[in-house]
Amino acid sequence: MNDVLYYAECVKYALRKRGIIEDDFENSGLRFYKRKVANPKTIFKTLRKGGVIIPWVDSSLFGDNANSFIATILLSVSEDQSRVMLYNPVSNTERYYTTNEFLQSWEKANGACTTAFDKDGTYTPKLLDLMHITLPDFMDELCEAIAENAHDTWAWERQSEGWTYGPKRDDEKLQTPDMVPYSELPDSERQYDRVMAFDTLRLLLALGYKIVKI
């Protein structure tokens, strides 16, 4: 994932804003993760927790017509979440963009993103590098089926604990707006399950298994 344009510059810029005089995450003392997220709720929560967020965006967002991907830094989100402040490594500036502009550009890069957090005693999971594994198009339907099954399994388990539908999450009343069929979930919520499904299939291929429809 480091071959994206301006990635090293963004890492260095982000670390300097945190007062860390290092040029890479490996020596920064932070926990960092490289993966595909493509979920605005996830990264907005990450930002509120004080995390560093470096997503890839389509270069056209910054006025570059090179048809490539450029790293940026998500610096802040407006209170109504209609605007985000991004670091533009091309011009070395910070400015606001509409959230829709950012998300559309980020989705073109398939949600590629690096996040980093202060070390707090949390264990660091050791994952296989699956980012180089490309799934054939015919697996899209399979991924969606796995994602839907994962949601149904989650809903079944939550209902067995007494959870029901509610317009907003309420842990005391055991209510959640996600207690609906998979097809009725917002796309941002379905993306949680899709990421799990895609990573599961990538893992199978990485371990040498073949998937054949019979």
Image (spheres, rainbow, N blue to C red):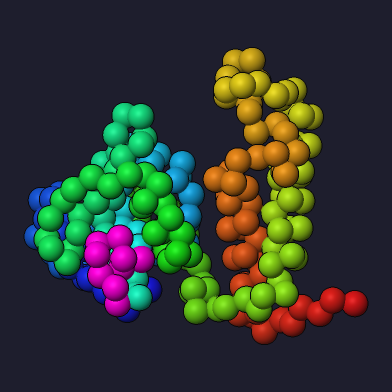
On the rendered image, what quadrant is the N terminus found in?
Answer: bottom left
Of residues 132 and 19, the one nearer the viewer is 132
Determine whether, in the image, residue 33 is placed left or right of residue 25.
Answer: right
Residue drawn at 26 percent across, 55 percent down: 73
Where residue 3 sits in the image (x, y, percent)? 32, 78
Determine whether, in the image, residue 204 is placed left or right of residue 84.
Answer: right
User: Is residue 65 one of those drawn in magenta?
Assistant: yes
Q: Name the quadrant containing residue 89.
A: bottom left
Residue drawn at 58 percent across, 51 percent down: 191
Determine whether, in the image, residue 113 is placed left or right of residue 128.
Answer: left
User: Which residue extends farthest right?
Assistant: 214
Residue drawn at 34 percent across, 75 percent down: 68
User: Is residue 172 one of those drawn in magenta?
Assistant: no
Residue drawn at 72 percent across, 44 percent down: 183
Numbered range of the magenta stretch: 58-66
Work out whether 193 lies above or below 36: above
On the rendered image, what quadrant is the C terminus found in?
Answer: bottom right
The reply to whether residue 52 is in sight is no
The reply to whether residue 97 is in sight is yes
